[in-house]
Image (spheres, helix red, strand yellow):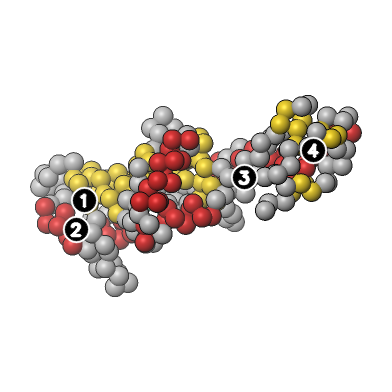
Amino acid sequence: MTKMRIDKLLANMNLGSRSEIKKYAKQGRITVNSIVEKNTARIIEPDKDVVALDEQIVRYQKYIYLMLNKPQEVVSATEDNLHRTVIDLLSEEHKAYSPFPVGRLDKDTEGLLLITNDGQFSHSLMSPKKHVNKKYFVEVSGSISESDVKKFYDGIVLDDGYKTKPATLMPQEYFENKDTSTCTVIIQEGKYHQIKRMFADIGKKVLFLKRVEIGNLSLDESLKPGEYRELTEQEYQNLLQLQGENE
Ligand code: URA
């Protein structure tokens, strides 16, 4: 059972800084189970105790689930000595949940990145055993042939000897002698630099990479690179259902 201090609960719910909350307590504005509580260091159990500020019950939200349109030049990490991280893009309110990215996108990759503080949820989505599709929009050098599509499907032996599971390569057009081509790729794994290494094997360089879907969740195209929002209840439920189906 989760236990926490009253001031942490109220601060996490963005109801004030610790010192403001102390002031509210002194003013008798905070109650626990309908009894005024002036000690903000008191430990409560959010699942059991009813905490209220100005008679408004504060429902504790333990987990957050955010969808970020990751821009280039930021790293998918919680801390980094050299670069800005995806967590640096969040508001103080969301940072208070100690969230982390679900899996990784390379520094120069854009697109759909989930950020949460729910470890179980993250693990279930990223585990290769769950076979969750990840769809990418890709721009590459050169032209894509039908034999490239077959190679992706049959599996590509990466530079470290690992053979990739069947991947779907869908070129937007099959023109020969093109300088650059666009396509979508669906993979279920997430090996280091996987898509770049798969294209490298067929002699092409990835020029632009953007993740557009994870399972049944699509990137909200109204989010500009660097913008994010909370998942809707429906999006969250859809992902939970997907995790259950792929058990
Ligand atoms: N494959 C890559 O090469 N990079 C990513 O960021 C994601 C998939």
Cα distance between the residues tagged 2 and 3? 41 Å
Label 4 with label 1: CB-CB less than 8 Å = no
Q: Nearer the viewer, residue 98 or 174?
A: 98
Question: 52 above or below 62?
Answer: above
SS assignment at label 1 = strand
Label 2 with label 3: CB-CB less than 8 Å = no
Label 2 with label 1: CB-CB less than 8 Å = yes
Cα distance between the residues tagged 3 and 1? 39 Å
Q: Position of residue 123 (x, y in %)?
A: 47, 57
Q: Nearer the viewer, mark 2 or mark 3?
A: 3
Query: Does residue 207 show up?
Result: no
SS assignment at label 4 = strand
Cα distance between the residues tagged 4 and 3? 18 Å
Which mark, residue 153? 2
Residue located at (41% from left, 59% from top) = 127
Which of the 4 image quarters holds residue 148?
bottom left
Q: Which residue is mark 1?
A: 169
**Lower sequence index among marks 4 and 1:** 4
Q: Position of residue 17 (x, y in %)?
A: 76, 37
Residue located at (44% from left, 55% from top) = 124
Q: Which residue is mark 3?
A: 62
Q: Which residue is mark 4?
A: 32
For the residue carrying disc 3, how many other residues have a C-alpha within 10 Å: few (<14), some (14-19), or many (20+)? some
In the image, what residue type sits under mark 1?
Leu
Q: Nearer the viewer, mark 4 or mark 1?
A: 4
**Lower sequence index among marks 4 and 3:** 4
